[in-house]
Image (cartoon, grey):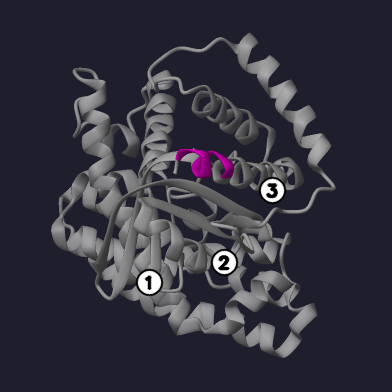
């Protein structure tokens, strides 16, 4: 299997690189540089806590960008297993071959319709609330940005290594300034100043449950919204309407699954981490959620959060439905209507 694995890794990594060549320029400069630094660490197999010099990273970035330039006009390769070629987005068919051998593959479309791919070792495959969770460990092939989780149909892909790296990035960023904020509260549950590796492992295991819950919410949201939602995203791709629509669906998914579960369990570490990473756009759209979080901090009354999340589920489901209606009415001209609709729907 080793020679077969090497060939498979080469093909999947090339598809990752072709995708990055076409889409890496979509990130802001700050995000791009941070992601390239993390990508360098993964590419070189460096431990998360090791310091790396800006000079060596800079040289590697220049080489990577030159390589990407050479791939701009290249097509994606099929994924070949035992002499059979599979289109790279057909994850289900590919995994039917790979899962029994202890590997897991992911391929799909993400933000801005960017194709994403990864290949890793399979840690576990288990049923979960009517879904199948595939947990990947070590990753053999990946892109610049490696999302910790994604859902396709009723299959939820969890990338544990990517989650661990993402958490370390968040912790490291906080440790540069050590501000007293939601991230400080989350980190305080784990003891990073005493045993970094153990703390990161505990945080990864805790947040693993949260990302699974979010993806379950994404699947449920998809079932509620139907196929028109994905058609709409493709139509308004690379517009403000896409960003706003994705933010609405994220909020709906969290109100459907992740936040109710975290609140019922009173998982305070993960609740603080959630609010530490709530994007500015989602904060702007859902100010009552942030207000309820601050009320909880000052009063220890978690009921205010539960109420806002319950009401938020109904609100964001209605808004998402209105987005689909706007798309069904205006089709190719729906972006402007969607932008206005979402901006007028703050809650």
Q: Position of residue 33 (x, y in %)?
A: 63, 28
Q: Relative to the observer, which residue lies in front, 126 or 221?
A: 126
Give the number of the mark in front: 3 or 1: 3
- Left or right: 236 as drawn, with respect to 316: right
Seen at 37% across and 29% down, the residue is 171
What is the number of the mark on residue 184? none
Residue with the mark numbered 3:
19
Quadrant location, the C terminus: bottom left
**Circle 3 Cα neighbour tier, 10 Å, few/some/many (<14 / 14–19 / ≥20):** many
User: Quadrant location of residue 262?
Assistant: bottom left
What is the secondary structure assignment of the residue under circle 1? helix
What is the secondary structure assignment of the residue under circle 2? loop
Residue with the mark numbered 1:
312
Separation of disc 2 and disc 1 at Cα?
A: 35 Å
Seen at 74% across and 42% down, the residue is 21
In the image, the segment drawn in magenta is 2-7
Residue with the mark numbered 2:
90
Residue 291 is at least partly visible in this image: no
Q: Residue lying at the far bottom in this picture: please name it.
A: 329
Residue 5 is at least partly visible in this image: yes
Residue 25's place in the image compared with 155, above or below, is: above
Separation of disc 2 and disc 3 at Cα?
A: 16 Å
**Circle 1 Cα neighbour tier, 10 Å, few/some/many (<14 / 14–19 / ≥20):** many
Of labels 2 and 3, earlier in sequence is 3
């Amino acid at each position: 299997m080793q020679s077969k694995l090497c060939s498979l890794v080469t093909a999947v990594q090339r598809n990752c690189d072709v995708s990055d060549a076409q889409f890496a320029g979509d990130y802001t400069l700050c995000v791009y540089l941070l992601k390239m630094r993390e990508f360098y660490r993964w590419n070189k197999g460096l431990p998360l806590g090791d310091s790396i010099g800006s000079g060596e990273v800079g040289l590697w970035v220049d080489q990577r960008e030159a390589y990407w330039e050479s791939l701009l006009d290249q097509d994606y390769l099929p994924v070949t297993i035992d002499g059979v070629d599979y289109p790279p987005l057909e994850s289900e068919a590919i995994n039917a071959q790979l899962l029994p051998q202890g590997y897991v593959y992911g391929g799909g479309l993400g933000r801005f319709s960017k194709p994403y791919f990864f290949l890793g070792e399979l840690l576990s495959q288990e049923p979960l609330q009517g879904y199948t969770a595939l947990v990947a460990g070590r990753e053999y092939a990946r892109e610049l940005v490696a999302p910790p989780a994604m859902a396709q149909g009723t299959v939820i892909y969890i990338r544990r290594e990517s989650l661990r790296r993402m958490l370390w990035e968040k912790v490291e960023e906080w440790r540069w300034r050590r501000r007293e904020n939601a991230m400080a509260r989350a980190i305080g549950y784990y003891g990073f100043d005493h045993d970094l590796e153990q703390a990161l492992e505990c945080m990864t295991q805790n947040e693993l449950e949260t990302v699974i819950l979010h993806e379950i919410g994404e699947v449920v949201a998809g079932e509620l919204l139907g196929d028109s939602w994905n058609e709409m995203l493709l139509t308004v791709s690379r517009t403000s309407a896409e960003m706003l629509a994705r933010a609405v669906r994220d909020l709906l998914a969290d109100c459907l699954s992740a936040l109710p579960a975290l609140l019922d369990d009173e998982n305070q570490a993960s609740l603080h981490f959630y609010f530490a990473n709530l994007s500015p756009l989602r904060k702007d759209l859902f100010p009552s959620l942030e207000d309820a979080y601050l009320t909880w901090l000052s009063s220890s009354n978690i009921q205010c959060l539960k109420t806002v999340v319950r009401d938020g589920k109904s609100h964001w489901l209605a808004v998402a439905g209105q987005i689909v209606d706007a798309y069904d009415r205006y089709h190719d001209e729906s972006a402007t209507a969607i932008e206005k609709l979402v901006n007028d729907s703050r809650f």
